Amino acid sequence: MITLDKVKWGFIGCGEVTEKKSGPAFSMIRNSEVVAVMSRDLEKAASYARRHNIPRWYNDAQLLIGDEDVNAIYIATPPSSHATFAIMAMKAGKPVYIEKPMAATYEDCARINRISRETGVPCFVAYYRRYLPYFQKVKEIVSRGEIGNVINVQIRFAVPPRDLDYNNKNLPWRVQADIAGGGYFYDLAPHQLDLLQEMFGCILEAEGYTSNRGKLYDAEDTVSACFKFESGLPGSGSWCFVSHESAKEDRIEIIGDKGMVSFSVFTYDPITLHTERGMETIQPQNPPFVQLPLIQAVVEHLQGKSICTCDGLSATTTNWVMDRILNKL
């Protein structure tokens, strides 16, 4: 078992997600600091390092992984490269914290887990919403039995296209399936599916229908799915990434025999609880850097103080579900 007194991070990738959601949090935790960053664009890496007071920067992942001062790796690149970088790092004896989804395919997740098992080097995945007060409150409502026996779960998500989606000569990587694993579904649905599996256990059956209705890019832009948890609880989901503004929605409903709780995953609208008492709204406050609670759990795991369960094994099931829905398996 790896135990680190001080966790010295090297970042592979220093894009948008590292600016606010994750990057600053690594240095806000006791005995954790960022000592090096890497981007294929050396000037981008240098700019990020200077702005965040990080001493070293690289444009070669192997050089960063080989940096003797770096003892843990944060992988914040598009999903298609997650497996390559994670395996390189674990074979060098360095724990990894990977952005979600864990990889672009279920098969790549299995490869990462195999190397983690063979080397004994841990792998964690950034399903940080599990640790946020907002979603922990939802889990508490369900586990306390406030809505009774849960009988159905429904996901509904719809957003209009982004301006970038109309530029077919320079499309975002998130809609290029060979890089992202799919379209926006593969980028956003993981958070929803991971939260539900955290609450209700593994999804063991999943089927989906996909379509490209907007014709803005090749990847699917509309998805409908049904799934069943290990307990037998059924669920369904619909996702549309080319909807009209009037159809915009970010909502999960958990329906019980004594009430219902509904919540958003990305907009953090007030949680709505319907019971025999009537309707209540609840608004838990999240930290300004949303990955902070999970990163703290990862650091404490690496220091031997606690166990972080947001690992590669638990993250792999989400990739399996998505690949089943997209008919990749």
Image (tube, grey):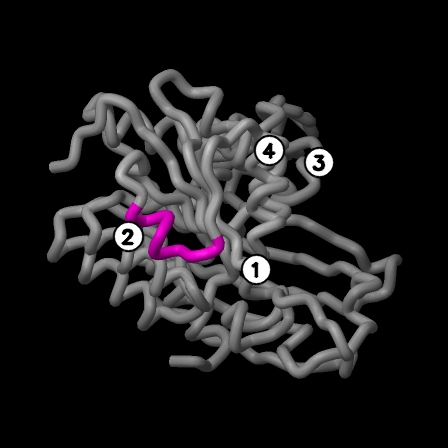
Q: Contact (CB < 8 A) between labels 1 and 2?
A: no
Q: Quadrant of residue 285?
A: top right
Within 10 angstroms of label 4, few (less than 14), some, or many (20 or more) residues?
few
- Specify the quadrant that holds the N terminus: top left
**What amino acid is at disc 4?**
Arg
- Quarter of the image for residue 46 reads top right
The residue under label 2 is 89
**Rounded to the nearest whole Å, what is the CA distance between mark 3 and mark 1?**
20 Å
Q: Earlier in the sequence, mark 2 or mark 4?
A: 4
Task: Identify which amino acid the numbered label 1 is placed on.
Answer: Asp
Tell me which residue sits at (20%, 55%) in the image.
Answer: 91
- Residue at 63% of width from left, 32% of height from top? 51
Whole-angstrom CA distance, mark 1 to mark 2, is: 23 Å
Residue 64 versus residue 117: which sits nearer the camera? 64
Residue 320 in the magenta stretch? The answer is no
Answer with left or right where residue 51 lies relative to residue 10: right
Label 2 to label 3, Cα distance in Å?
Answer: 38 Å
| Foreground label between 4 and 1 | 4
Please determine whether, in this image, residue 283 is positioned above or below residue 96: above
- Name the residue that disc number 3 marks: 269
Q: Which residue is mark 1?
A: 187
Q: Are the residues tagged 3 and 1 within 8 Å (C-beta)?
A: no
Q: Position of residue 133 (x, y in %)?
A: 52, 26
Assign a secondary structure to mark 4. helix
Label 4, on which residue? Answer: 50
Q: Which residues are magenta?
A: 59-66
Q: Position of residue 84 (x, y in %)?
A: 34, 64
In this view, the residue in front, 165 or 268, is: 165
